[in-house]
Image (spheres, rainbow, N blue to C red):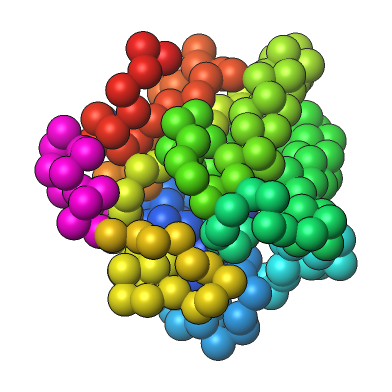
Amino acid sequence: MDLKLQGKVALVNGASQGIGFAIAHSLASEGADLLISARKEEALKRAAEQLATVTGREVRTVVGDIRMQDGCNNILAAVQAIGGVDILINNDGAPPLGPALDFDDLRWSRAFEQNLLSVVRMCRGVVPMMEARGGGSIVNITAGTAIQPLPNFGLSVSTWAGVIGLAKTLSIELAPKNIRINTLCPGLFDTPRLDRSDSGAPPDQASNFNLQEVLKTIPLGRKGQPAEIASVATFLASPMASYVTGTTLSVDGGGNRGLF
């Protein structure tokens, strides 16, 4: 299927590894040119070189920490410099794990800035440029716990639930501008972050995580591969999903037992 992404320009945040890298690879494989961001310059450079070699598409980079206003500003300045983008992928890591009431105000403020305010800032920055280009598509990457909470994930659940609410609101406000926005809620995926959790996380990431026990709760009985969520994100970002906006979709092997 031709997803009609040839010549589109996509900004993918958190693209040096894991799900972000897989989404960037999928978009470029479908013909999109890339602007990718991450916090660490060397990892970002390696990712860009690999993506350009494998896909043959143009891959630009910008170092930026979306947890900080300055980081978002750096990324948006790079977007402005290339004349805007057609696609925005809001993707990053996650706040620390632990009992919700054990975190002080500073930790809560950081989680809010990382997960929710970063999305506000990125959308606020790219939307005028998307409108000038005739429209666009935004895809937010959150987590399955945003719609099916688990103990110790309070920082993520609370702030990513806000992203879902924001996206639903923006889907209404931005539709007249031909800009769509959707949210994906990934379950358990085979990424470096999962490896760190399973092998023993740092003290501030303590979650009593047990991979084998979690796998028992997934009907498909396995971890997802980053390419499996990347293909969903790429479809939602593409013109082939032109009548889909404001949706929140689980990509979790059947782990979400709710009706919606």
User: Which stretch did the figure color magenta?
Assistant: 211-225
Residue situated furthest bottom in the rendering: 42
The part of the image, by quadrant, that contains residue 154 is top right
Residue situated furthest left in the rendering: 221
Q: Nearer the viewer, residue 109 or 192?
A: 109
The spot of residue 170 in percent (x, y) is 73, 23
Give yes or no for residue 213 being in the magenta stretch.
yes
Residue drawn where x is 64% and y is 74% of the image: 39
Against 112, is 245 above or below?
Answer: above
Against 18, is 255 above or below?
Answer: above
The spot of residue 169 in percent (x, y) is 73, 19
The spot of residue 2 in percent (x, y) is 31, 32
Q: Quadrant of the C terminus?
A: top left
How many numbered markers are drawn? 0
Residue drawn where x is 52% and y is 20% of the image: 247
Residue drawn where x is 31% and y is 22% of the image: 257
Judge whether residue 10 can be spotted in this image.
Answer: no
The spot of residue 69 in percent (x, y) is 86, 61
Against 175, is 56 above or below?
Answer: below
- The dominant secondary structure in magenta is loop
Give yes or no for residue 97 being in the magenta stretch.
no
Against 235, is 74 above or below?
Answer: below
Q: Nearer the viewer, residue 60 or 186?
A: 186
